Amino acid sequence: MANNVVRIGLVVFAYLVGSIPVGVILGKLKGVDPRRTGSGNIGATNVMRVGGKALGIVTLLGDAAKGFVPVALAGALGCDALTIAIVGLAAFLGHIFPVFLGFKGGKGVATALGVYLAIRPLVILGAFIVFLIVFLAWRYVSLASMVGAIVVPVGLYLIKAPCELVSMSGIIGILVIIRHKENISRLLKGTENKI
Protein backbone atom coordinates (compact mmCIF):
# COMPACT_ATOMS: atom_id res chain seq x y z
CA MET A 1 0.00 0.00 0.00
CA ALA A 2 1.22 3.49 -0.84
CA ASN A 3 1.92 5.91 2.01
CA ASN A 4 0.73 9.53 2.17
CA VAL A 5 3.91 10.96 0.65
CA VAL A 6 3.53 8.65 -2.35
CA ARG A 7 -0.15 9.54 -2.68
CA ILE A 8 0.56 13.28 -2.65
CA GLY A 9 3.41 12.79 -5.09
CA LEU A 10 1.11 10.87 -7.44
CA VAL A 11 -1.52 13.61 -7.37
CA VAL A 12 1.05 16.32 -8.14
CA PHE A 13 2.59 14.13 -10.86
CA ALA A 14 -0.84 13.49 -12.38
CA TYR A 15 -1.66 17.20 -12.49
CA LEU A 16 1.69 18.12 -14.07
CA VAL A 17 1.45 15.33 -16.65
CA GLY A 18 -2.14 16.38 -17.39
CA SER A 19 -0.90 19.94 -17.91
CA ILE A 20 1.42 18.98 -20.78
CA PRO A 21 -0.14 20.72 -23.84
CA VAL A 22 0.28 17.93 -26.36
CA GLY A 23 -1.82 19.61 -29.05
CA VAL A 24 0.08 22.91 -28.76
CA ILE A 25 3.49 21.19 -28.87
CA LEU A 26 2.56 19.06 -31.89
CA GLY A 27 0.85 21.98 -33.62
CA LYS A 28 3.99 24.09 -33.39
CA LEU A 29 5.91 21.31 -35.15
CA LYS A 30 3.62 22.00 -38.13
CA GLY A 31 3.83 25.77 -37.67
CA VAL A 32 0.31 26.22 -36.30
CA ASP A 33 -1.04 27.07 -32.87
CA PRO A 34 -4.44 25.42 -32.29
CA ARG A 35 -5.27 28.10 -29.71
CA ARG A 36 -5.29 30.71 -32.48
CA THR A 37 -6.83 28.68 -35.28
CA GLY A 38 -10.12 26.86 -35.83
CA SER A 39 -12.13 26.59 -32.63
CA GLY A 40 -9.15 27.67 -30.51
CA ASN A 41 -9.22 24.41 -28.57
CA ILE A 42 -6.01 22.46 -27.86
CA GLY A 43 -7.68 19.04 -28.19
CA ALA A 44 -7.46 16.42 -30.91
CA THR A 45 -10.50 17.54 -32.93
CA ASN A 46 -9.21 21.08 -33.47
CA VAL A 47 -5.62 19.92 -33.98
CA MET A 48 -6.94 17.59 -36.69
CA ARG A 49 -8.74 20.50 -38.35
CA VAL A 50 -5.71 22.79 -38.35
CA GLY A 51 -2.84 20.28 -38.64
CA GLY A 52 -4.24 17.22 -40.38
CA LYS A 53 -5.57 13.81 -39.43
CA ALA A 54 -2.25 12.28 -38.36
CA LEU A 55 -1.50 15.16 -35.99
CA GLY A 56 -4.99 14.90 -34.54
CA ILE A 57 -4.62 11.17 -33.90
CA VAL A 58 -1.24 11.63 -32.19
CA THR A 59 -2.75 14.41 -30.07
CA LEU A 60 -5.61 12.11 -29.08
CA LEU A 61 -3.18 9.36 -28.06
CA GLY A 62 -0.95 11.81 -26.17
CA ASP A 63 -3.86 13.38 -24.29
CA ALA A 64 -5.22 9.94 -23.41
CA ALA A 65 -1.78 8.87 -22.16
CA LYS A 66 -1.81 11.85 -19.78
CA GLY A 67 -4.76 10.28 -18.01
CA PHE A 68 -3.73 6.66 -18.35
CA VAL A 69 -0.15 6.77 -17.08
CA PRO A 70 -0.70 8.39 -13.65
CA VAL A 71 -3.77 6.26 -12.89
CA ALA A 72 -2.09 3.05 -14.03
CA LEU A 73 0.93 3.95 -11.88
CA ALA A 74 -1.30 4.56 -8.85
CA GLY A 75 -2.91 1.17 -9.40
CA ALA A 76 0.45 -0.55 -9.80
CA LEU A 77 1.59 0.98 -6.50
CA GLY A 78 -1.38 -0.51 -4.70
CA CYS A 79 -3.29 2.69 -4.06
CA ASP A 80 -6.87 2.53 -2.80
CA ALA A 81 -9.89 3.59 -4.85
CA LEU A 82 -10.03 7.07 -3.32
CA THR A 83 -6.40 7.80 -4.20
CA ILE A 84 -6.87 6.46 -7.72
CA ALA A 85 -9.97 8.65 -8.12
CA ILE A 86 -8.09 11.75 -6.93
CA VAL A 87 -5.13 10.97 -9.20
CA GLY A 88 -7.48 10.55 -12.18
CA LEU A 89 -9.26 13.80 -11.39
CA ALA A 90 -5.91 15.60 -11.00
CA ALA A 91 -4.77 14.46 -14.46
CA PHE A 92 -8.08 15.59 -15.96
CA LEU A 93 -7.91 18.97 -14.19
CA GLY A 94 -4.32 19.35 -15.41
CA HIS A 95 -5.58 19.15 -18.99
CA ILE A 96 -8.43 21.62 -18.60
CA PHE A 97 -6.50 23.97 -16.28
CA PRO A 98 -2.86 23.47 -17.32
CA VAL A 99 -0.22 25.32 -15.33
CA PHE A 100 1.92 25.55 -18.49
CA LEU A 101 -0.75 27.49 -20.43
CA GLY A 102 -1.92 29.92 -17.78
CA PHE A 103 -4.69 27.49 -16.69
CA LYS A 104 -6.42 27.74 -20.07
CA GLY A 105 -6.67 24.24 -21.49
CA GLY A 106 -8.89 21.87 -23.41
CA LYS A 107 -12.14 20.08 -22.75
CA GLY A 108 -10.60 16.97 -21.24
CA VAL A 109 -12.39 14.23 -23.18
CA ALA A 110 -9.27 12.36 -24.35
CA THR A 111 -7.58 12.67 -20.94
CA ALA A 112 -10.73 11.32 -19.28
CA LEU A 113 -10.65 8.46 -21.78
CA GLY A 114 -7.15 7.58 -20.61
CA VAL A 115 -8.22 7.71 -16.96
CA TYR A 116 -11.10 5.33 -17.61
CA LEU A 117 -8.99 2.96 -19.71
CA ALA A 118 -6.71 2.57 -16.71
CA ILE A 119 -9.53 1.75 -14.28
CA ARG A 120 -12.31 -0.01 -16.22
CA PRO A 121 -11.60 -0.52 -19.95
CA LEU A 122 -14.85 -2.44 -20.55
CA VAL A 123 -16.91 0.58 -19.53
CA ILE A 124 -15.00 2.60 -22.10
CA LEU A 125 -15.89 0.04 -24.75
CA GLY A 126 -19.57 0.59 -23.97
CA ALA A 127 -19.16 4.37 -23.92
CA PHE A 128 -17.28 4.23 -27.23
CA ILE A 129 -20.10 2.28 -28.87
CA VAL A 130 -22.57 4.94 -27.70
CA PHE A 131 -20.15 7.69 -28.85
CA LEU A 132 -19.91 6.06 -32.28
CA ILE A 133 -23.68 5.70 -32.66
CA VAL A 134 -24.26 9.37 -31.78
CA PHE A 135 -21.38 10.54 -33.97
CA LEU A 136 -22.45 8.50 -37.01
CA ALA A 137 -26.04 9.67 -36.60
CA TRP A 138 -25.32 13.41 -36.28
CA ARG A 139 -21.60 13.88 -37.15
CA TYR A 140 -20.94 16.10 -34.13
CA VAL A 141 -17.87 15.14 -32.09
CA SER A 142 -18.96 17.51 -29.32
CA LEU A 143 -22.39 15.92 -28.92
CA ALA A 144 -20.95 12.39 -29.01
CA SER A 145 -18.31 13.36 -26.43
CA MET A 146 -20.89 14.78 -24.03
CA VAL A 147 -23.13 11.74 -24.33
CA GLY A 148 -20.10 9.50 -23.76
CA ALA A 149 -19.18 11.51 -20.68
CA ILE A 150 -22.65 10.83 -19.26
CA VAL A 151 -22.56 7.12 -20.11
CA VAL A 152 -19.32 6.40 -18.19
CA PRO A 153 -20.53 7.14 -14.63
CA VAL A 154 -23.74 5.23 -15.35
CA GLY A 155 -21.69 2.29 -16.62
CA LEU A 156 -19.37 2.36 -13.60
CA TYR A 157 -22.38 2.42 -11.29
CA LEU A 158 -24.03 -0.50 -13.08
CA ILE A 159 -20.93 -2.70 -12.79
CA LYS A 160 -20.70 -1.79 -9.09
CA ALA A 161 -17.35 -0.01 -9.32
CA PRO A 162 -16.16 1.62 -6.06
CA CYS A 163 -18.23 4.69 -5.23
CA GLU A 164 -15.07 6.84 -5.34
CA LEU A 165 -14.58 6.00 -9.01
CA VAL A 166 -18.26 6.56 -9.81
CA SER A 167 -18.11 9.95 -8.07
CA MET A 168 -14.91 10.90 -9.92
CA SER A 169 -16.47 10.01 -13.27
CA GLY A 170 -19.58 12.00 -12.38
CA ILE A 171 -17.49 15.09 -11.60
CA ILE A 172 -15.54 14.63 -14.83
CA GLY A 173 -18.78 14.19 -16.79
CA ILE A 174 -20.21 17.44 -15.39
CA LEU A 175 -16.98 19.33 -16.14
CA VAL A 176 -16.86 17.94 -19.71
CA ILE A 177 -20.38 19.25 -20.33
CA ILE A 178 -19.54 22.64 -18.77
CA ARG A 179 -16.42 22.87 -20.96
CA HIS A 180 -18.66 22.28 -24.00
CA LYS A 181 -21.00 25.20 -23.23
CA GLU A 182 -20.04 27.02 -26.43
CA ASN A 183 -20.60 23.83 -28.43
CA ILE A 184 -24.01 23.43 -26.78
CA SER A 185 -24.89 26.97 -27.81
CA ARG A 186 -23.81 26.27 -31.41
CA LEU A 187 -25.70 22.96 -31.43
CA LEU A 188 -28.87 24.74 -30.37
CA LYS A 189 -28.34 27.37 -33.09
CA GLY A 190 -27.47 24.75 -35.73
CA THR A 191 -24.03 26.28 -36.35
CA GLU A 192 -21.82 23.60 -34.77
CA ASN A 193 -19.10 22.21 -37.05
CA LYS A 194 -19.60 18.66 -38.30
CA ILE A 195 -16.82 16.17 -39.04
Image (cartoon, helix red, strand yellow):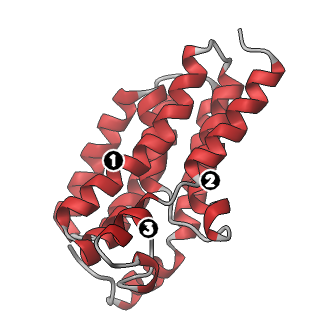
Q: Residues within 10 Å of mark 3 (few under 14, many from 20)?
A: some
Q: Which residue is mark 1?
A: 61
Q: Amino acid at mark 2?
A: Gly
Answer with the quarter of the image where residue 122 lies. Answer: top left
Camera-side mark, 2 or 3: 3
User: Of callouts 1 and 3, which one flags the residue occurring earlier in the amino acid sequence?
Assistant: 3
The disc placed on residue 10 is none
Q: Quadrant of the C terminus?
A: bottom left
Q: Residue 156 appears at what percent x and percent y?
A: 49, 32
Q: Give the left or right position of residue 75, taking residue 191 as reference.
A: right
Classify 10 Å Cα crowding around label 2: few (below 14), some (14-19), many (20 and above): many
Residue visible at 72% across and 40% down? 12
Any part of residue 152 in sight: no
| Disc 1 crowd, CA 10 A, few/some/many (<14, 14-19, 20+) | some
Residue picked out by circle 3:
24
Q: Residue at x 38, y 48 (%)?
A: 62
